[in-house]
Image (tube, coloured by chain):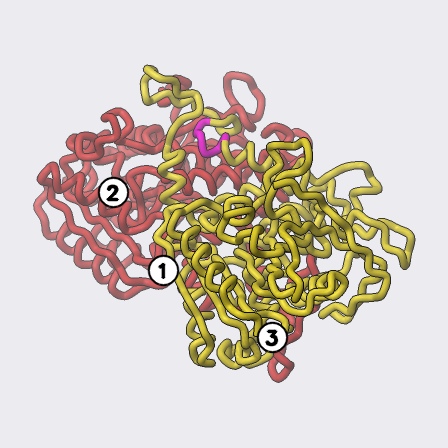
Chain colours: A yellow, B red
């Protein structure tokens, strides 16, 4: 499936939750499949930290450019583009095409940098809703996302209950725990205290806070994987160990790579620091921290979710310690307290939080049958 | 109880596991209690990353200078200094009095810095054994430690089986998992890539890689606590929240402190960076990474522990995800496979890895009764 990115400009200001507003921005998006005559087959895919509007398919002439959820979305796939019109959108403040910190603020004529307004999950949903208005789509057959993307799917059902028939929330949570916030904060501190960050205005200095970005990504990677899968993939294997050599081959070094897991993390950190924007990292982790629909309801999630009328599918993974199954169960319980239509699956997968991006047959099969059901339903 | 630090110089070289050796070093140590006539009541306490020879009591005129295991050690306490002669020793390469990276290498006349030799748990045990030789102590009634200190206690029983009657191993593991190594590596990278690290020779530049040390300590703190205790202590509480104010008081900031957990971590990181040595951090985390007594036995821990003839007490804490109970159980099983005398307790405590330093009554009571037993035993 060949796809191509598009860009939608928005001149009019968007009011943000913080009280600030942003104008003259654009959103990068991609669509696949065909919108049907009554415009009832649209599915919106929301992305997490390190992803974009490029959810599925490849770009012309770039066979290795598969979208980040290509296992899930495409012709004949669980979210079947022969049946659904799938929209991927890059969020405001990201660094993959939509307006973000590296762009010029029309109010000042200067690059935003650290002055890019703080955006929340709710703000992203409002911006996505405006994009749907432009595309002439009143209601979504489904909104779907994993992790931070799942928070957006949940928020859609709360902010625009009449526009969402189904919300598919994978490996997500009703808010972050103190430990989740703590990991985000360490990553942010690594970036902000990198001397190349320059208070977030590094663009004008011609440098990039790569040291901080590398550390941030290494921390992230640890939390995406389970202890088990790390032991299985890397264990205590030495980098220098070659077939036939003695197992005990320590180099006794404090700064060089000794274990394979170190090599893996350094590689992942280095790659990430080559393409990800430091200010975007701060913005997106803060959107995670701030998300908390129960906050305005004295912490009562059931009360908060009363506004949602969509049908829900929730999926969690047993070894995901970042967004553990019990967090998904909190959402399930709050929806059931409101007598909503909820399906929930806890997949016994070894891969930790990363499992939501992987091709587990039970998980894939479950999403397939859920979207079959959506496809057969009459639009309300 | 008033204690005072002492220092023991060692002129003769100590051969290290890496093949290197170190000479002209000294060890800082403290003792409390009285060595009995047959020298059979000595207890050696081994420390973990951020601790020292100052295990218990206070320094003259400094009432707030309690040792790091003062809850456990002292007159009438579980490790009763009215009965036992307790020795605390600061390890080689540490930064609290023993020879370390900030001292002068007698071979070069220069400060060691990053050239301080890599030291292992086994090297520390050898150095501690030499100290005992000097003190005229042939055999220990017990060697005891938590976390990395527990690894030393275990290693004592393997390296000097005839010199150890009891090994008390708390919140420890037979080696690090890939995830443990991963956290150590991220912390090390934060330090090493801090521009003020200067390849480990920052002393001569008059700077300290505080940015890296802060990040390292923040990561450490997250792994010392349980998710539960973090939620209980901090939850999603806002720093700016004041009594009576609306609960929703976000400031919408990416760089300033918003949540209490952020404030706590920044404070802990800052405090640590004021006193801990960056090269010591690298050395001690590497000693953790390298410890793996089963390595020379094709990963067979039972075979590795066959050399140990001491009696063992192992303690783990249910919410410790850094050195989880299953890691202690591996040691217990390997000892039982060798028909050794082993006691094991899994304490249902909410505090994560930190629990080993806290005053849980069941834990304290258990250690008390175990040391009662030791005190009543005839020396072999």
Of A6 and B168, which appears nearest the observer? Answer: A6
Task: In the rendered structure, find residue B358 and report the number of the disc placed on it.
Answer: 1
Please, which chain is the residue tagged with disc 1 on?
A: B
> What residue sits 39% from the left and 44% below the top?
B48
Task: Work out how far the residue at label 1 is from the one at label 2, CA to CA, in angstroms.
Answer: 19 Å
Among the two numbered marks 1 and 2 on one chain, the one whose residue lies closer to the N terminus: 2
Q: What element carries label 3?
A: helix
| Pointers 1 and 2 within a single chain | yes
Q: Position of residue B343 (x, y in %)?
A: 16, 50
Please, which chain is the residue tagged with disc 3 on?
A: A
From this viewpoint, is residue B57 visible?
no
Residue A119 appears left or right of A378: right
Say whether marks 1 and 3 touch (CB < 8 Å): no
Q: Does residue A48 sit above or below B301 in this rendering?
A: below
Residue B379 in magenta stretch:
no
Camera-nearest label, 2 or 3: 3
Task: Work out how far the residue at label 2 is from the one at label 3, CA to CA, in angstroms.
Answer: 64 Å
Task: In the rendered structure, find residue B143 and report the number of the disc placed on it.
Answer: 2
From which residue to which does the magenta span run? Answer: A258-263
In the rendered image, the quadrant that contains the N terminus of chain A is top right
In the rendered image, the quadrant that contains the C terminus of chain A is bottom right
Mark 3, residue position = A161
Residue B276 appears left or right of B369: right
Residue B370 appears left or right of A182: left
> What residue sits 45% from the left and 61% below the top?
A370
Predominant secondary structure, magenta span: helix
């Amino acid at each position: 499936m060949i796809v191509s990115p598009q860009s939608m400009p928005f001149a009019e200001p968007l009011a943000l939750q913080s009280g600030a507003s942003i104008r003259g921005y654009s959103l990068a998006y991609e669509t696949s499949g065909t919108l049907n005559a009554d415009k009832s087959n649209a599915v919106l895919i929301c992305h997490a930290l390190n992803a974009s509007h490029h959810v599925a398919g490849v770009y012309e002439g770039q066979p290795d450019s598969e979208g980040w959820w290509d296992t899930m979305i495409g012709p004949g796939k669980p979210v079947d583009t022969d049946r659904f019109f799938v929209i991927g959108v890059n969020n405001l403040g990201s660094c993959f095409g939509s307006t973000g910190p590296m762009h010029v603020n029309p109010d000042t004529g200067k690059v935003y940098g650290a002055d890019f307004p703080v955006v929340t999950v709710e703000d992203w949903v409002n911006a996505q809703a405006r994009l749907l208005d432009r595309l002439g789509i009143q209601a979504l057959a489904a909104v779907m996302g994993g992790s931070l993307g799942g928070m957006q799917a949940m928020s859609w059902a709360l902010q625009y209950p009449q526009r969402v028939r189904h919300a598919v929330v994978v490996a997500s949570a009703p808010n972050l725990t103190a430990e989740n916030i703590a990991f985000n904060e360490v990553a942010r501190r690594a970036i902000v205290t990198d001397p190349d960050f320059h208070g977030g205005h590094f663009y004008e200095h011609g440098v990039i806070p790569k040291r901080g970005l590398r550390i941030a990504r290494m921390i992230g990677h640890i939390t995406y994987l389970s202890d088990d899968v790390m032991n299985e993939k890397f264990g205590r294997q030495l980098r220098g160990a070659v077939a036939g050599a003695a197992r005990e081959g320590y180099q006794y070094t404090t700064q060089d790579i000794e274990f394979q897991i170190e090599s893996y993390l350094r590689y992942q950190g280095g790659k990430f620091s080559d393409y990800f924007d430091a200010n975007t990292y701060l913005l997106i982790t803060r959107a995670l921290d701030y998300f908390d629909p129960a906050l305005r309801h004295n912490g009562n999630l059931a009360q908060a979710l009363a506004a949602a009328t969509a049908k829900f599918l929730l999926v969690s993974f047993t070894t995901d310690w970042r967004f553990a199954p019990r967090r998904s169960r909190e959402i399930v319980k709050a929806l059931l307290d409101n007598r909503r239509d909820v399906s929930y699956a806890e997949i016994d997968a070894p891969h930790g939080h990363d499992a939501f991006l992987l091709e587990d047959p039970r998980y894939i099969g479950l999403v397939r049958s859920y979207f079959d059901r959506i496809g057969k339903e009459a639009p309300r």
